[in-house]
Image: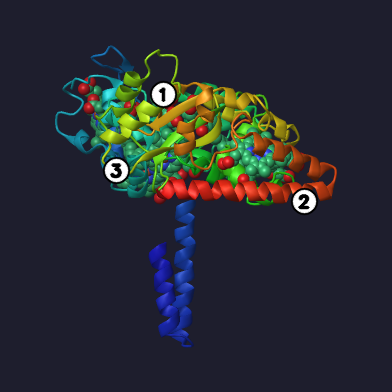
């Protein structure tokens, strides 16, 4: 059909206006008509594939028993294959070794279904280079490489014999992620996005819209998920700024779900970042530095107190060849599951006091985190008093308004700011000025300490 179209274009340009041209054009249209007709007819298997299906779509083909004792059905449905996106792909494109003379006559041992599936890891590369490349550094691919028997490869998420267009994930339970992350899928289905997705369709995110489908990273690594939120909710910063002073800073110091999963438990996550670039530190494979040093430093195994934190950081930086590691605080949820229980905006956390008050609950639980070789979090408990300690003042950046015990003046000013906003605009103004002076001072302190 493509060739016919090309011919008709060529014909058009070269013999335009001539009677001959007209005749040729008529002929071309006649060809196109019949070609289109042929395309409408049901797709068929090529003759080679038909030969395979003589056995593989027959009732006589017996399931294969693996050495692990599992039963593997060898029956491939021709109608399903023809209805799939691979209906123009030949069996031997993926099964190069299946057309040998002995095939089907001699039984070849198979260790396990998983082992067999893993043997197809390179089978998709020729035709789907981009997906394979995206997948390569994902948390799933690293887990597979490390020998996990539960992390997915291509075939766990896509069935080669029945794959439909990925645009058709209807109902949402068909999303491949649901097979393995069952609890998260259940939470998601009842939250604001899951309900919206079912009610109104594709504008609301499914798993891959927040996590990506192939280049999936561990959830707490970096700011990828927040950026995905902001990519759809483009006006979020503007809308929050109306009531939330310096919403940009809040967006850095608080993950969106902290306010939007209203009943969730919150905590402070002290992330280890590069003191110069600010990038999250990822542990090298085979070098269990974090675990070793944190165990050595945590004398009581009750979580770091101030001096344990100090000696841990010192030991860590002594061993490291790169820049100094510092801590970057962020408010997060205690459970990743709760990140999938987002509510409508009227239920979101708006009460400043929840965070800006003496003994504020989210600051009572603290954890230190470094990313492991696969990006997943390695954690160490930390006593909450560390937040107010001198150690963290020296190493914490961009997170000084922690609880109220930390900087009493700031909280006092915050109360004024809030009162000012709500009650007396003039009081607000002066409080804001006062506050700004304090803020600038702090900022200057921080800049000078970070350039030391
Ligand atoms: C796009 C690639 C692709 C094509 C085309 C393809 N297969 Fe497969 N096939 C696979 C993969 C990948 C597996 C391993 C599946 C798994 O792990 O579930 C597989 C597994 C099988 C199995 C073992 C049973 C099973 O379901 O795991 C049989 C039998 C089989 N294929 C036959 C065929 C036949 C016959 C054709 C053509 C009519 C065909 N395949 C076309 C990729 C393909
Ligand atoms: C004569 C019948 C027959 C034909 C034709 C046939 N197969 Fe098979 N096939 C079998 C049998 C029987 C097995 C199980 C063999 C075993 O137990 O090792 C099998 C196994 C397989 C497997 C499972 C993996 C494995 O190695 O055991 C795949 C994949 C497969 N065939 C693909 C194909 C493809 C592709 C074609 C066409 C090129 C084809 N078969 C043609 C009978 C056939
Ligand atoms: C963890 C599950 C998962 C794994 C593993 C996975 N995929 Fe996907 N893939 C998806 C999802 C989900 C989509 C749909 C993406 C979307 O809607 O944005 C998709 C989409 C696709 C598409 C069509 C859209 C596109 O981006 O081109 C292709 C082709 C594809 N995957 C091939 C592969 C190959 C090849 C591999 C192995 C390297 C692989 N997938 C591994 C989940 C997965
Ligand atoms: C010989 C080429 C070839 C091989 C090998 C192949 N595919 Fe495909 N695949 C295609 C073609 C052609 C399509 C049709 C749509 C397209 O162009 O993306 C397709 C479509 C898909 C889709 C649906 C894409 C969409 O847009 O919805 C997925 C998912 C997919 N393939 C996964 C796989 C996986 C997984 C493997 C390896 C086990 C594999 N393919 C191997 C040629 C191939
Ligand atoms: C609206 C965006 C969004 C959608 C949609 C979404 N997630 Fe998440 N997911 C998140 C956020 C945010 C986190 C938590 C990040 C953190 O802990 O810092 C997370 C965390 C996770 C984690 C890690 C959980 C843990 O215990 O640390 C997994 C696994 C996960 N999601 C899988 C899924 C699956 C599967 C789906 C689809 C059913 C899904 N997500 C849908 C945003 C989303
Ligand atoms: C075959 C099973 C399987 C499938 C399918 C699967 N995953 Fe996973 N996934 C795992 C395993 C196993 C882990 C590692 C253990 C864990 O953290 O839950 C993991 C880890 C993750 C993590 C990192 C969790 C962390 O600690 O931060 C995210 C995010 C994630 N998966 C998202 C997805 C998304 C999105 C999909 C669908 C596109 C998906 N997974 C499909 C098995 C699967
Ligand atoms: C300090 C808590 C807090 C944080 C952090 C926060 N939000 Fe909100 N958000 C709220 C509250 C409260 C509302 C409801 C405001 C109102 O009364 O209209 C809201 C409203 C929204 C709305 C609805 C806007 C509208 O009016 O249509 C969206 C979308 C939203 N937030 C997304 C986000 C995203 C994305 C992030 C992270 C980048 C985020 N929020 C961070 C508290 C927060
Ligand atoms: C693929 C686009 C997309 C992504 C990604 C996305 N959302 Fe949404 N979100 C929607 C749509 C569509 C709705 C429902 C319509 C609306 O209220 O805007 C919605 C609704 C909401 C609401 C309810 C708003 C209200 O009016 O009550 C909140 C809160 C929200 N999203 C927060 C988030 C957060 C936080 C993230 C990231 C963790 C996120 N969204 C990621 C598209 C997205
Ligand atoms: C979920 C917890 C949380 C809520 C709710 C919250 N904040 Fe904050 N706020 C923070 C954190 C954490 C910081 C510290 C940011 C930093 O220093 O990096 C902060 C910083 C600030 C700052 C200092 C910003 C600057 O410019 O330096 C002000 C002012 C502020 N908050 C006011 C408010 C007001 C007013 C409200 C209520 C409308 C509010 N906050 C609600 C957690 C919260």
Q: Is residue 380 visible?
A: yes
The colour scheme applied to this rendered structure is rainbow
Residue 81 visible at all: no
Quadrant in which ligand 3 is drawn: top left
Task: Confirm or reject: label 1 Cβ below 8 Å from ligand 9.
Answer: no
Mark 1 → mark 2, Cα distance in angstroms:
41 Å
Nearer to us: label 2 or label 3:
2
Q: Which image quarter: residue 56?
A: top left
Mark 1, residue position: 307
* Horizontal side, residue 103 vs residue 398: left or right: left
Which of 51/175 is in front?
Answer: 175
Crowding around mark 2 (Cα neighbors within 10 Å: few <14, some 14 to 19, many 20+) is some
Which residue is rendered at x = 51% and y = 35% of the image? 329
Q: Where is residue 430 in the image (x, y as percent from the top left)?
A: 76, 50
Kindly indicate the quadrant of the structure image that contains residue 349: top right
Asked if the residues shown at circle 2 and circle 3 are in contact, with their CB atoms under 8 angstroms apart, the answer is no
Q: Which is nearer the eye, 253 or 41?
A: 253
> In this picture, is 284 found above or below 8?
above
CA gap, disc 2 and disc 3: 45 Å
Q: Classify mark 2: helix, strand or loop.
A: helix
Question: Which is more foreground, mark 3 or mark 1?
Answer: 1
Return the disc, 3 or 1, that comes first in the chain's sequence.
1
Residue in the image at 54% along x and 37% along y: 169
For the residue carrying disc 1, how many other residues have a C-alpha within 10 Å: few (<14), some (14-19), or many (20+)?
some
Pointer 3 residue: 322
Q: Which of marks 2 and 3 is nearer the N terminus?
A: 3
Label 3 residue SS? loop
Task: Provide residue 112's location: percent of width, then percent of height.
Answer: 27, 19
Depth order, front residue of 22/240: 240
Residue occupying the point 26% across, 34% down: 319
Residue 429 disc label? 2
């Amino acid at each position: 059909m493509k060739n016919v179209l090309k011919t008709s274009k060529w014909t058009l340009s070269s013999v335009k206006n001539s009677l001959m041209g007209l005749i040729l054009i008529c002929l071309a249209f006649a060809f196109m008509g019949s070609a289109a007709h042929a395309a409408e007819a049901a797709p068929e298997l090529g003759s080679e594939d038909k030969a395979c299906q003589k056995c593989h779509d027959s009732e006589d083909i017996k399931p294969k028993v693996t050495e692990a004792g599992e039963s593997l059905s060898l029956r491939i449905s021709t109608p399903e294959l023809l209805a799939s996106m691979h209906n123009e792909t030949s069996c031997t494109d993926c099964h190069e070794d299946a057309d040998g003379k002995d095939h089907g006559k001699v039984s070849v041992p198979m260790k396990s279904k998983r082992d067999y599936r893993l043997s197809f890891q390179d089978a998709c590369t020729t035709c789907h280079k981009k997906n394979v490349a995206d997948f390569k550094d994902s948390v799933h691919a690293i887990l597979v490489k490390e020998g996990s028997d539960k992390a997915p490869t291509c075939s766990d998420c896509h069935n080669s014999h029945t794959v439909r267009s990925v645009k058709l994930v209807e109902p949402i339970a068909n999303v491949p992620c649901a097979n393995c992350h069952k609890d998260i899928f259940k939470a998601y289905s009842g939250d604001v996005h899951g309900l919206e997705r079912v009610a109104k369709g594709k504008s609301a995110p499914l798993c891959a819209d927040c996590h990506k489908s192939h280049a999936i990273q561990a959830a707490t690594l970096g700011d990828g998920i927040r950026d995905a939120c902001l990519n759809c909710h483009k006006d979020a910063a503007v809308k929050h700024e109306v009531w939330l002073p310096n919403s940009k800073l809040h967006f850095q110091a608080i993950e969106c779900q902290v306010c939007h999963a209203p009943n969730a438990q919150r905590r402070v996550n002290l992330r280890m970042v590069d003191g110069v670039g600010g990038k999250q530190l990822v542990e090298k494979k085979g070098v269990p530095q974090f675990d070793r040093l944190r165990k050595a430093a945590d004398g009581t195994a009750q979580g770091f107190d101030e001096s344990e934190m100090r000696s841990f950081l010192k030991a860590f930086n002594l061993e490291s060849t790169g820049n100094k590691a510092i801590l970057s605080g962020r408010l997060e949820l205690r459970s990743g599951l709760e990140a999938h229980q987002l509510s409508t905006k009227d239920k979101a956390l708006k009460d400043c006091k929840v965070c800006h008050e003496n003994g504020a609950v989210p600051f009572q639980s603290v954890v230190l985190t470094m990313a492991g070789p696969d990006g997943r979090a390695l954690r160490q408990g930390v006593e909450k008093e560390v937040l107010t300690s001198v150690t963290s003042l020296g190493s914490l950046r961009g997170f000084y308004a922690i609880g109220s015990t930390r900087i009493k003046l700031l909280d006092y000013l915050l109360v004024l700011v809030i009162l000012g906003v709500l009650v007396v605009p003039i009081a607000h103004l002066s409080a804001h000025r006062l506050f700004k002076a304090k803020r600038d001072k702090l900022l200057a302190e921080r800049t000078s300490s970070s350039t030391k």
